[in-house]
Image: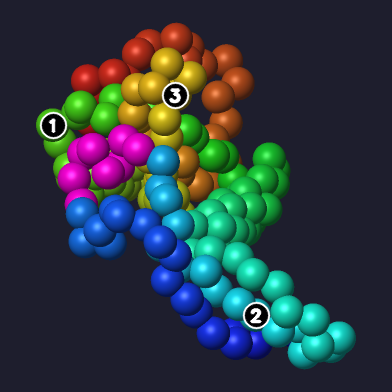
Amino acid sequence: MTEHHYTKHLNSKKSLHNIGVNVINSTRIPQLEKIFINKTNGQKFATDEVKIMEYKRNKQITFFGEKYSSNSKYTMIELGFDFSVSVKTSEILLKLKRKLKKLGTPMLGYFWLVDRGMNGTMHFHLVVGIKRLSLKGKNTSKRTENHL
């Protein structure tokens, strides 16, 4: 068990309040160093808010994957979107929920994240958990690119 001890600001010229495409498209620079104490052995250790954010994100993705990984109960679908898509993520989710509901397969859970590809381009990943789909004997080659 750990306990937060104190936080100190790191010397960085980047503002905490910058939001925009250029910030999203760049590597996050830590602004704060957080010092914790291990209550078991009394040792101090340091981390930053970026590492904490990544840890929490990875923990949520792992939890989602563990929950919906049962092939006998669930199907996970991954969708990829170019960062320059003009539709808001919330609209994509709403349309997807409606389509799945019409098909009698409600969305049980989802997560999405922004990723930078090997060539530096930004894109979204959306992973959806639904009840198990049986696709045996069905044609799955039809593209659904513009059908959302």
From the viewer's perspective, is the residue at label 2 or at label 3 nearer? Answer: 2
The amino acid type, in three-letter code, at marker 3 is: Gly
Crowding at dot 3, Cα within 10 Å, few <14 / some 14-19 / many 20+, comes out as few
Q: Quarter-wise, where is residue 5 in the image? A: bottom right
Neighbourhood count class around disc 2 (C-alpha, 10 Å): few under 14, some 14–19, many 20 upward: some
Residue 114 placement, left or right of 41: left
Q: Which mark is residue 118?
A: none
Q: Are marks 2 and 3 in contact (CB under 8 Å)?
A: no
Which of the marked residues, 1 or 2, is nearer the chain's N terminus? 2
Magenta stretch, residue numbers: 19-26
SS class of the residue under badge 3? loop
Question: Residue at label 3?
Answer: 117
Residue at 55% x, 74% y is 34
- Residue situated furthest right in the rendering: 41
Tell how many labels: 3
Dot 1 corresponds to which residue? 86
Whether residue 56 is visible: no
Which is more toward the observer, 5 or 102?
5
C-alpha span from label 1 to label 3: 19 Å
Q: Is residue 20 on the magenta stretch?
A: yes
Disc 1 versus disc 2: distance between alpha carbons? 42 Å
- Disc nearest the viewer among 1 and 3: 3
Mark 2, residue position: 36
Going 69% across and 46% down the picture, which residue do you hit?
70
Magenta segment: does it hold 104?
A: no
